[in-house]
């Protein structure tokens, strides 16, 4: 059951990545959504960055994307390591370590996305 | 009598005796090949005329027993089922199936595969043990229910799918395409009542979710079975089960003979028109 749950969320996270990484690419690299870059010019111009940092939808999307990417990547890493044939005790320990590292990175990333809200006030 | 045309084909045969050799070597033999000769015929020719020490396994010679699985020009297949001139006009490389230990030369050790196959409980299990042991009637099963698992019953356990599987090559604990396909085969059999037990086996680590879906198992199968499809359908069943959406029908019941049905009236044969 545990493996079924892991794999199911692995597939769901892939779909989430497809949607939110697509949004990220559209906003940041294709400059197609002018609504997120109101100052015009480069997407990395200060005005645009400050605007996006205030946008709750984008902050939410980055947190979701971060969680999905971490889960998807770490599940892939776990699968690769397990295929190398480690002992069952190592497999269990490795899974726990990946959960801990993943949650720490997710916490740091989430804090960054929320803390970015202060950019405009810093200006 | 007209002489049958022959083509000289060079056989490169992998030789290895784990008790004597440090590593495998390749030996070369020339075989005069007639149209219709199989790889197994070629190996028999070598054994009879050139090198009696060559080791290979065979039994039925008709693609039924699954004994003569080997790598033929780099692809897994049955030696008795592969005609030499269909795969080459000049040289043929023959090697044992990979992902198995080698007993000698072209003979892989299939015992671990059979052990895994046994562990997935590949037989019909029911609660009405008495009826199963001493059957009084047939179990009801529609043609559609039969079609759901029929193709997977054609598996002859030759090991070609196991040899071609890239996951098997890296993960020695992986159950493999054959046992996983057989889990699906018995789970969708409407006469079986042990689906939950086998689903637990399929959902463990090194089982269905480790399949990379390379599809090589299905391409390699000499009987046209599609193990990759069975594994993906098994994944689908497990995921639906995780969300509580899986529909596992009731176990097939005994097919009772109708009591009130009337038989067709006896029709007399028409009178003879000739030879009275």
Image (cartoon, coloured by chain):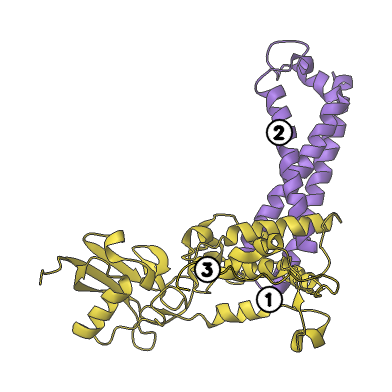
Rounded to the nearest whole Å, what is the CA distance between mark 3 and mark 2? Answer: 37 Å
From the viewer's perspective, is residue B18 above or below residue B254?
below
Question: Which tag is nearer the camera, tag 1 or tag 2?
Answer: 1
Name the residue tied to disc 3. Answer: B162
Question: How far is disc 3 from disc 1 in space, using C-alphas?
Answer: 16 Å
Q: Is residue A71 above or below residue B246?
A: above
Look at 36% across and 84% down and name the residue there: B17
Q: Nearer the viewer, residue B143 or B121?
A: B143
Q: Which chain is purple?
A: A
- Left or right, B208 with respect to B196, comes to left
Q: Is residue A84 visible?
A: no
Position of residue B113 relative to residue B206, above or below, is: below
Q: Output the chain of dot 1.
A: B
Q: Nearer the viewer, mark 3 or mark 2?
A: 3
Residue B120 has which mark?
1
Spatial CA distance of label 1 from label 2 is 41 Å
| Mark drawn on residue B27 | none
Tell me the subunit letter for badge 2.
Answer: A
- Side of B215 where B135 appears, left or right: right
Q: Quadrant of the N terminus of chain B?
A: bottom left
Asked whether, in this view, residue A18 is left or right of residue B22, the answer is right
Kindly state the secondary structure of the residue where label 2 is placed.
helix
> Which residue is at the front of the view, A117 or B241?
B241
Q: Residue furthest top?
A: A40
The picture quadrant where one finds residue B193 is bottom right
- As drawn, the residue found furthest toward the front would be B276
Which numbered marker is on residue A21? Answer: 2
Callout 3 secondary element: helix
Chain letter corresponding to the colour yellow: B
Q: Where does the image place residue B40, in percent across and percent down from the top left?
A: 32, 75
CB under 8 Å between callouts 3 and 1?
no
Q: Position of residue B163 (x, y in %)?
A: 48, 68
């Amino acid at each position: 059951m545990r493996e079924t749950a892991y794999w199911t969320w692995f597939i769901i996270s892939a779909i989430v990545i497809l949607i939110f990484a697509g949004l990220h690419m559209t906003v940041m690299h294709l400059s197609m959504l002018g609504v997120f870059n109101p100052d015009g010019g480069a997407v990395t111009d200060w005005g645009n960055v400050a605007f996006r940092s205030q946008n709750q939808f984008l902050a939410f999307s980055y947190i979701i994307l971060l969680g999905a990417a971490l889960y998807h990547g770490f599940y892939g890493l776990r699968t690769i390591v397990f295929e190398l044939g480690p002992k069952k005790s190592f497999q269990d320990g490795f899974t726990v370590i990946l959960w801990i590292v993943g949650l720490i990175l997710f916490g740091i990333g989430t804090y960054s996305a929320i803390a970015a809200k202060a950019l405009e006030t810093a200006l | 009598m007209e002489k049958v045309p022959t083509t000289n084909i060079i056989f490169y045969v992998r030789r290895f005796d784990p008790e004597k050799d440090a590593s495998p070597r390749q030996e070369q033999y020339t075989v005069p090949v007639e149209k219709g000769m199989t790889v197994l015929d070629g190996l028999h020719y070598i054994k009879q005329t050139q090198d009696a020490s060559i080791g290979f396994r065979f039994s039925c010679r008709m693609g039924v027993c699954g004994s003569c699985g080997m790598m033929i020009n780099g692809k897994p297949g049955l030696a008795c089922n592969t005609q030499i001139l269909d795969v080459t006009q000049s040289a043929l490389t023959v090697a044992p199936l990979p992902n198995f230990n080698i007993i000698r030369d072209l003979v892989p050790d299939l015992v671990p595969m059979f052990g895994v196959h046994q562990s997935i409980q590949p037989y019909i299990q029911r609660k009405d043990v008495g009826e199963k042991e001493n059957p009084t009637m047939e179990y009801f099963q529609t043609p559609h229910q039969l079609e759901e698992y029929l193709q997977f019953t054609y598996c002859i356990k030759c090991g070609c799918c196991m040899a071609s599987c890239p996951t098997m090559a890296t993960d020695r604990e992986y159950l493999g395409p054959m046992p996983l396909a057989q889990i699906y085969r018995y789970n969708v059999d409407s006469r079986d009542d042990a689906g939950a037990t086998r689903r637990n086996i399929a959902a463990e680590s090194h089982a269905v979710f480790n399949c990379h879906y390379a599809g090589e198992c299905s391409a390699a199968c000499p009987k046209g079975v599609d193990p990759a499809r069975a594994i993906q359908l098994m994944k689908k069943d497990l995921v639906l089960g995780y969300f509580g959406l899986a529909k596992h029908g009731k176990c097939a019941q005994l097919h009772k003979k109708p009591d009130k049905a009337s038989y067709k009236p006896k029709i007399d044969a028409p009178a003879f028109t000739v030879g009275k």
